[in-house]
Amino acid sequence: MVNLKRKGKKSSKLIQDGLDHKGDVCPFCEGQEEATFPEVFALRENGSPQDSPGWKVRVIPSISPIFGIEGGLGKKGEGGIYDLMRGVGAHEIIIETPRHLNSLHLLDTDQIELVLQAYIQRISDLKKDKRFRYLLIFKNYGKNAGASKIDHTHSQLIAMPITPKMVKEELVGARKYFAYKERCIFCDIIKQEKLSGKRVVCENDGFLAFCPFASRFPYETWILPKRHQCDFEEMSNEAITSLAQILKEFFCRLFHCLGDPSYHWFLYTGPNRIPRRDHWETLCKDFHWHFEILPRLGKVAGFEWSTGFHINPLLPEDAARKLRECSLPELFISSYPDPPTRQ
Amino acid sequence: MVNLKRKGKKSSKLIQDGLDHKGDVCPFCEGQEEATFPEVFALRENGSPQDSPGWKVRVIPSISPIFGIEGGLGKKGEGGIYDLMRGVGAHEIIIETPRHLNSLHLLDTDQIELVLQAYIQRISDLKKDKRFRYLLIFKNYGKNAGASKIDHTHSQLIAMPITPKMVKEELVGARKYFAYKERCIFCDIIKQEKLSGKRVVCENDGFLAFCPFASRFPYETWILPKRHQCDFEEMSNEAITSLAQILKEFFCRLFHCLGDPSYHWFLYTGPNRIPRRDHWETLCKDFHWHFEILPRLGKVAGFEWSTGFHINPLLPEDAARKLRECSLPELFISSYPDPPTRQ
């Protein structure tokens, strides 16, 4: 049992003001850079100065951080059976566009590529910090997914001092499979899904999107690189382009098929091996980075919480067929029209 | 990966009618026995006939069963990597009182004892079925916990063909601790919690209620028998009385302290060892049955779903102090006044 003591201050009244007054100023829009904490990273054109307009993707520290960046882990025991450590980590917000758009599927693929490049930059940078064991990128979209009040499209990056339980389960499972078969389980899943085709949503040269066997949620979808790769940040430029395209297509399908669904998405990449090279040296063979997208259409109740099993009323084969066969209007082919920027 | 194919028919329009028409007939009230499936068990006075008034606790099959009772497991593979089995199991509803009361804390302790006796009877009976690996009793109370439309207080019993993931994690953890220390981890937790006292909510001769270290949710509480025991159904009559008293006190504290909170509760008992005596023969030493109560005051978002970790804004020490120091009105000491029975 590990208790991560949370360190964080609810401050920066600027953002709160920006949101709470009349909802007419979005702190994530271009031109509102002073309404947030100073940026930790930005993709900018023409050498425009930090915390000013001219950016394409902007990364800022979270206003309500789950972890605090300073200090050591301070591990200690309590009463012989319990373990405590400080909540040391980083919690950043990746603002995916300077324009006031509320969803990733409204961005054009060039812009999505920039978002992915920002992910890579931040992951590569934070991996150098030896206190961090895992870097997680996730997104909550919509009320039912617990999204924040700021609807300007953004994702969150968390650097953590321990590998998350869910990720560890996948790592351990993948390793056991590799030990038995000498093959990557994710590569085998890709092969099997391509062969049967019934759970495939869409694919392109580099990536496969499919509703996994025994999905937890209706329309749950995983997106995997077809080429075996442990770490997200090792993607080639060609793969980034390919990933941007499939993300655009998948989210257009999700929105056209289901309206405006709430969802979580997670990027599960290999853990940070710098602090523990001994432990993870063989990992590159058996883990395979991927996205998991969990639409949140219903409630999760006692059965799920008590068992860890999920009741999914929709077969993944049916979900995949609906997403695959949903006809996309030309909106998808051309770019979305320019909505007015809220300032 | 296991896909449990669900078998169940949404039928019995009687219950649906009883609920949906005007909400003035509760199918779980005494006198409405015909509005439900025939009972599988009841505690009755004076030898009153089945499916008629005169019962104290009544157990019926669920109208929307997660599992179906008939047939074999039908295990098979798909494509070499996936495993399927049929959703064979039982799903029963334990109606905790013939009167229309909406919460367990409104029952007097004699009635709570009868509920616990019904749990024991059903668990003992279903354990004889060798297809079932685990028997889980749980309850969803309140809208935020995904409770059903029927607010007449009831719990659910599920007999499953596999041990739930969450339970297995506790079993494996307890076994590893036992292998290392030759002591039960739950017994050690009781000892530690009694020593420090800061997370204790209430206790009596037989039981301890405390907010566990590194709780997942605000006011999360576990109730453990002080005497080491693996299986719930092996409780003595004296222990049943003691458990009824602490449940009454704990839920009165929860309701007086928090208003009318939504919560889940689970009974985690030892798995069914009849089908696999080889595997679980040493289990009695290292597992220790208990209740877990998870109030649902906020939302669970992407961080929790992606990591398996929980952000709890309230320290368990503070939660326990509030529950412990909350002064209970005489309502708790005397019985609750008789509310009108809805018929």
Image (cartoon, coloured by chain):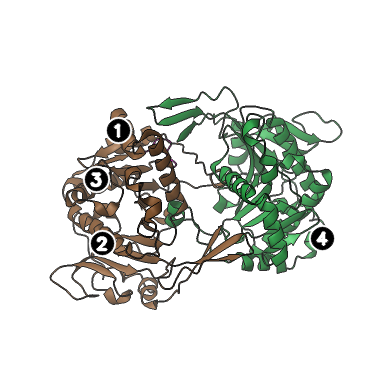
Chain colours: A green, B brown
Indicate which disc residue B121 carries: 2
Q: Earlier in the sequence, mark 3 or mark 2?
A: 2
Q: Nearer the viewer, residue B263 or A203?
A: A203
* Residue at 15% in and 68% down: B45
Magenta part of the chain: B212-217
For the residue carrying disc 4, how many other residues have a C-alpha within 10 Å: few (<14), some (14-19), or many (20+)?
A: few
The answer to whether A144 is drawn above or below residue A323 in the figure is: above
Please give the chain letter of the residue carrying mark 1: B
Q: Is residue A147 visible?
A: yes
The residue under label 4 is: A333
For the residue carrying disc 2, how many other residues have a C-alpha within 10 Å: few (<14), some (14-19), or many (20+)?
A: some
For the residue carrying disc 1, how many other residues have a C-alpha within 10 Å: few (<14), some (14-19), or many (20+)?
A: some
The x and y percentages for residue B89 are 41, 66
The x and y percentages for residue A212 are 63, 59
Residue A258 shown in magenta: no
> Disc 3 to disc 2, how far (Cα)?
21 Å
Say which element carries label 4.
helix
* Residue at 83% in and 44% down: A237
Q: Is residue B218 visible?
A: no
Q: Which amino acid does the dot numbered 1 rest on?
A: Lys
Q: State which mark lies toward you, 4 or 1.
A: 1
Q: Earlier in the sequence, mark 2 or mark 1?
A: 2
Q: Quadrant of the C terminus of chain B?
A: bottom left
Indicate which disc residue A330 carries: none
